Image (cartoon, rainbow, N blue to C red):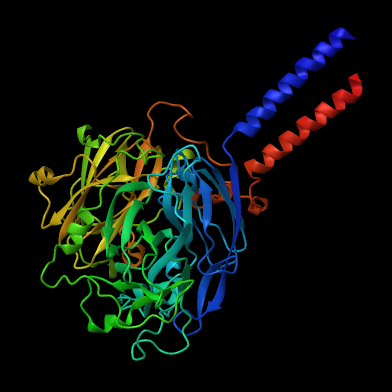
Amino acid sequence: MALRSKFLALFLIHICLLLSLCLAADPFVSYDFEVSYITASPLGVPQQVIAINGKFPGPTINVTTNNNVAINIKNKLDENLLMHWSGIQQRRSSWQDGVLGTNCPIPPKWNWTYQFQVKDQIGSFFYFPTLHMQRASGGFGSFVINNRAIIPIPFDTPHGDIVILIGDWYKRNHTALRKALDAGKDLGMPDGVLINGKGPYQYNTTLVPDGIDYETIEVQPGKTYRIRVHNVGTSTSLNFRIQNHNLLLAESEGSYTVQQNYTSLDIHVGQSYSFLVTMDQNASTDYYIVASARFVNESQWKRVTGVAILHYTNSKGKAKGPLPEAPNDEFDKTFSMNQARSIRWNVSASGARPNPQGSFRYGSINVTDVYVLKNKPLVTINGKRRATLSGISFVNPTTPIRLADQFKVKGAYKLDFPETPLTGPPKMATSVINGTYRGFMEVILQNNDTKMHSYHLSGYAVFVVGMDYGEWTENSRGTYNKWDGIARSTVQAYPGAWTAILVSLDNVGVWNLRTENLDSWYLGQETYIRIVNPEETNKTELPIPDNALFCGELSKLQKPEDISFAASITGNRSKLLFMLLMAVCALMSVFG
């Protein structure tokens, strides 16, 4: 009996160790998203929009640093779907990125579960569908990553957290917009700017018709709030401001900033910011929240202005008077650029940092690769209007790049994207940048178009080290900020100007580099950076997920029964704990 008791004791110790390991792992957070069409009237006219769980915009995903996240997507649209987590640096797993060059799409009526870890990240991000210009019809929402409790934030804890999604909007849905582009037409001026999916408050009866539902944000006087603002629009840069209130900038796409006050800030397509706003005004009236178009010439754009209401709980009346003025660049073309240059990284703040970890001394790292990516106005290739990057208009492969690598599918793409723009005629190609693992890449975004563009690199935060008007040259490096340039995932390139970024290629995978302007993106202005660890090891990239979808040359591998969403690791852990506990109970009954 003594031997049996010792055996039981040892077994129970092992069980406890297993339980402690299971419980000590990073927590799991799960969401179920049903993506469907609903009818809404954000600008007073009924139209088809894309909703998440019946809501437009979709719900906020709220997680904490190092959480494992499982998001089950049920596609109830009538077309393929992919969901992208903009700015989320999915460490070692481009399998979950949700862009067509990396992942096969989720067919209509299918379920698919994204699983990834928000490793060593904090900050304000958003999600959206990437295919067929679907973001122009909705399907977007905020993605918040909070600090762990043991990591202090570099400001007093705000009284509340407020999400504001701004973006230009068309009364035509994404299908109609896509057809216009396919026919060689421009999208034209948007019909309005939405704030949290709603149209403008009627601040002017001539410009704003009756019957439009507008957003109201209620606050308590004297309190300070963290306001997270995301530009989720189609192609328009917006100036954000709150009447009579200062915007204390605190964070941008995962990086705490040097805290500076702004009366307004230009937020370009795809960008996200956090402001600390103190409700320090008297409550004689409500106040306007405004998002208005920037870098446009037409006087009619006054109609394209988003207006919401900031309502103090003790407010005594409605907002009144003219809207607060946007910056006037007529006599100072560098105002917006100087404002962008003033945004600096808070290198002394503790907490999760963008990758590479702790590399705020980026100015002393040797550059291994230099790419000059040039954007020009639309061109005609094979009778079709196309957008290009360095003279190449990207063609999505039938077999996604990462999947083609995994199964050794030949000819899916070419690793021949040029380091400098092509000098010959533009071409259409599946041309990919061959990144050097653990290299340090300098990318020059040369915007020779007449429109503002913003560019995004999936899987990474990039160091924004310089921007100026004119053509970039080797001598431009003398103007770089080599100490505290902001690290972020989406950066603007002004018309007729360049922006320089640095990025440490330490995240293995295939990562999308694109314009965030939906029309140019749809017409081919993107590429991918392929980063492979030459050493054969599983430590630098997660394996292909069990629920991977197959398409193109590999479509024969897709089984009909695979449409059921993958069992989450959370569920597997629960089953493991249950089985271990049952084993303990059984042994206790046997040994008395």
Answer with the quarter of the image where residue 491 lies.
Answer: bottom left
Q: Tell me if 486 is positioned left or right of 55 in this view.
A: left
Q: State the residue lying farthest toward the top.
A: 2
Point out residue 230 in the picture as x, y percentages from the top left corner: 39, 61
502, 370: nearer the viewer = 502
Looking at this rendering, what residue extends furthest in the left direction? 475
In the rendered view, would you say 112 is above or below 529?
A: below
Q: Which of 158 and 356 lies nearest the eye of the viewer?
A: 158
Can residue 101 be spotted in the picture? no
Quadrant the N terminus occupies: top right
Image spot of residue 260 (x, y percent): 27, 54
Residue at image coords 61%, 32%: 24
Quarter-of-image position of residue 391 = bottom left
Residue 429: x, y in percent?
31, 54
Is residue 324 depicted above or below 338 in this figure? Answer: below
Residue 326 at what x, y percent from top left? 24, 72
Is 187 displayed left or right of 370 in the figure? right
Report the quarter where the C terminus lies: top right
User: Looking at the image, how many numbered discs can be counted on the residues?
Assistant: 0
From the viewer's perspective, is residue 143 above or below residue 408? below
Q: Is residue 141 visible?
A: yes
Most foreground residue, 107 or 24? 24
Q: Horizontal placement of 112 versus 431: left or right? A: right
The answer to which of 236 and 184 lies nearer the viewer is: 236
Residue at 10% of width from left, 47% of height from top? Answer: 476
320 lies above or below 61: below
